[in-house]
Image (cartoon, rainbow, N blue to C red):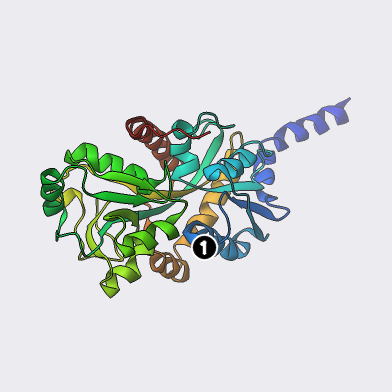
């Protein structure tokens, strides 16, 4: 009996050590990082940049898998239904993590409740660019010209509900103008018609616009975020030029299925933060036009997703866009 009590006390004493051992042994197999978009493009490039550096921090490789479709909803739903063990993660963007819940009639997950936030990677600013034939040099001149010529100016987007579409909706509302929206099936076709003069302007991402701005084929009027872009520091923001509070960008964040143990979230957060702080990754991200996040804390991403979901619900309602 005495021996039994001794063994029982020893087992009880060891219980507090179990959670630590749980975290210590994670991960014990490769981690899957799901990208909810096709290969190629800034989201894919950023995710693969991070994944390639994670093995040294976690001791296991990070395998990237593209699960594209429905504006990112297919990949996001797949991760939301995965086992909450930290082995399956989502490299999400504004679409699946904020906009799509109000844009699509039905999605199989909740961007706030279905995920455990790990880390915010940063954001990619959009930029308002115009065809050189449009007789304006800045945002104030654009607003004045648009008001004097209602319905004459048009803007191209990569599709209904895309950030390049909703950025124009916000601009119309906040600047009191009537730019006509012309949706395309992707950024490529939209850019082709913008360069050809079939449309007046676009709120496209900085990375896409940069070579055309530098070559003079497009004129940069304003950065759509609250602060200027590192890629084009001499281009003022739209907010600076008479539209205070205007702030549009595509954000990137990494999440796990809801219910993933906090110790595993903490370990993943630490590893990602270390990788993002290395000169190599910082340089690669800067080249891709990414602006770093103000904080790497998991709770910061959680709050950000919540506020962005509310913000975009209002803009989507104004746009009248609805997708199946």
Measuring from the top left, give residue 156's x and y in whole percent. 34, 51
Q: Above or below — where is 133 with respect to 216?
A: above
Give the camera-side residue of 120 and 35: 35
Q: Secondary structure at mark 1?
A: helix
Query: Which residue in the protein does label 1 denote?
Result: 45
Residue ID at (59%, 65%): 52
Q: Left or right: where does residue 292 sit relative to residue 148?
A: right
Measuring from the top left, give residue 22's x and y in whole percent. 69, 44
Q: Above or below — where is 299 with respect to 186?
A: above
Q: Quarter-wise, where is residue 64 in the image?
A: bottom right
Q: Above or below — where is 102 with respect to 193?
A: above
Give the camera-side residue of 323 and 271: 323
Give the quadrant of the N terminus: top right
Dot 1, how many residues are within 10 Å of its Cα: few (below 14), some (14-19), or many (20+)?
some
Q: Left or right: where does residue 40 sit relative to residue 301?
A: right
Q: Left or right: where does residue 198 sit relative to residue 309?
A: left
Q: Is residue 70 visible?
A: yes
Residue ID at (80%, 30%): 8
Give the camera-side residue of 188 and 60: 188
Measuring from the top left, give residue 117's x and y in whole percent. 51, 41
Measuring from the top left, give residue 100's x and y in whole percent. 47, 37
Considering every residue shown, the one lying at the far bottom of the view is 215
Residue ID at (48%, 33%): 101
Give the camera-side residue of 284 and 38: 38
Considering every residue shown, the one lying at the far top of the view is 1
Q: Is residue 225 visible?
A: no
């Amino acid at each position: 009996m005495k021996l039994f009590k001794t063994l029982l006390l020893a087992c009880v004493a060891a219980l507090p050590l179990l959670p630590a051992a749980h975290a210590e042994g994670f991960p014990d197999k490769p981690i899957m990082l799901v990208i909810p978009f096709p290969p190629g493009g800034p989201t894919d490039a950023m995710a693969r940049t991070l994944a390639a550096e994670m093995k040294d921090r976690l001791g296991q490789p990070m395998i990237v898998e593209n699960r594209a479709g429905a504006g990112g909803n297919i990949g996001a739903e797949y991760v939301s239904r995965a086992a909450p063990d930290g082995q399956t993660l989502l490299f999400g963007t504004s679409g699946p993590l904020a906009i799509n819940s109000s844009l699509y009639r039905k999605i199989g997950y909740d961007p706030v409740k279905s995920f455990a936030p790990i880390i915010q990677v940063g954001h990619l600013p959009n930029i308002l660019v115009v065809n050189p034939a449009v007789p304006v040099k800045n945002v104030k001149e654009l607003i004045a010209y648009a008001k004097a010529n209602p319905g004459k100016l048009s803007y191209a987007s990569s599709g209904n509900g895309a950030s390049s579409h909703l950025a124009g909706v916000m601009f119309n509302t906040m600047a009191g103008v009537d730019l006509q929206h012309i949706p395309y099936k992707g950024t490529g076709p939209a850019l082709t018609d913008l360069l050809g003069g079939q449309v007046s302007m676009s709120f496209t991402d900085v990375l896409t616009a940069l070579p055309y701005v530098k070559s003079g084929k497009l004129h940069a009027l304003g950065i759509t975020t609250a602060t200027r872009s590192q890629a084009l520091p001499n281009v003022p923001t739209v907010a600076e030029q008479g539209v205070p509070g205007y702030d549009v960008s595509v954000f990137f964040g990494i999440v796990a299925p809801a219910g993933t143990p906090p110790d595993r979230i903490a370990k993943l957060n630490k590893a990602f933060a270390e990788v993002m702080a290395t000169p190599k990754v910082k340089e690669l991200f800067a080249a891709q036009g990414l602006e770093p996040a103000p904080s790497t804390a998991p709770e910061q991403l959680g709050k950000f997703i919540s506020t962005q979901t509310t913000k975009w619900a209002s803009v989507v309602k104004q746009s009248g866009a609805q997708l199946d």
